[in-house]
Image (spheres, grey):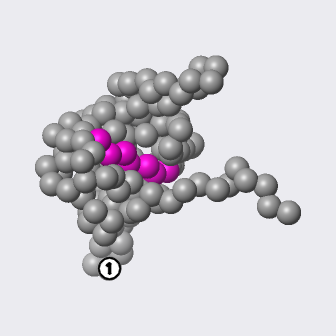
Amino acid sequence: MKLHSLISLLFAALFFSHSAAAGSSLSFDGAWIAEAPPSSKVMAAYMEINNSSDQTVKVVSATSESFKRISFHQTKNEGDMAKMEHMSTLTIPAKGKLVLKAGSHHIMLFNPVKRLKAGDQATLDLKLENGDSIKLEVPVKKQMMDHSHHMHH
């Protein structure tokens, strides 16, 4: 009987590993939402999305009970002007990652339902191209100034 159980378990593991949802191949590191002034109607979320699968994964939309609207943007520098460009999807390459950070790709969060301060959390519901959805708990943090571009001797 024990051998039979083991074989069943192995079969189940093999079966489920091949039919694993695309969402399970994604991991989210360092996700955070930048705290905004009380009057602000727009916030931004940043994170690193890693894709362990051998297929490109696309996030096609995001919703949240904390925000009326969410969209994806990329900041592009054209000459000395930084311009935000709307993106229809966030594309995470196979065996690769997409870094969402200030001045690059990011998630714009419009019209917070209530003021979100450092220490609060918002749930983002990310929809993938294949129909999967991922719920992500994202903490709100104070925006730290990035001093990495200064030279220290």
Residue at left offset 39%, top offset 25%: 87
Amino acid type shown at disc 1: Lys
Which residue is the site of mark 1?
A: 2
**To which quarter of the image does residue 7 belong?**
bottom left
Picture quarter with the C terminus: bottom right
Which residue is outermost to the right? 153
Residue situated in front as seen by the camera: 107 or 13:
107
Main SS of the magenta segment? strand
Query: Could you say where residue 86 lies in the image, as x and y percent from the top left?
Result: 38, 24
> Is 80 situated above or below 133?
above
Query: Could you say where residue 139 lies in the image, as x and y percent from the top left?
Result: 33, 62
Horizontally, residue 153 falls left or right of residue 39, namely right
Picture quarter with the N terminus: bottom left
- The residue carrying pointer 1 sits among few (fewer than 14), some (14 to 19) or many (20 or more) residues within 10 Å by Cα, namely few
Provide the secondary structure element on which disc 1 rests: helix
Query: Could you say where residue 32 lies in the image, as x and y percent from the top left?
Result: 39, 57
Residue at left offset 50%, top offset 45%: 101
Q: How many marks are shown on the rendered structure?
A: 1
Residue at left offset 45%, top offset 57%: 143
Query: Could you say where residue 8 lies in the image, as x and y percent from the top left?
Result: 31, 65
Horizontally, residue 88 falls left or right of residue 122, namely right
**Where are the magenta residues, as a range?**
42-48
Horizontally, residue 78 falls left or right of residue 41, namely right
Horizontally, residue 60 falls left or right of residue 104, namely left
Magenta stretch: includes residue 66: no
Residue at left offset 20%, top offset 56%: 115
Whether residue 104 is visible, yes or no, is yes
Residue situated in front as seen by the camera: 112 or 124:
112
Which residue is outermost to the bottom? 2
Residue situated in front as seen by the camera: 86 or 115:
115
Whether residue 125 is visible, yes or no, is no
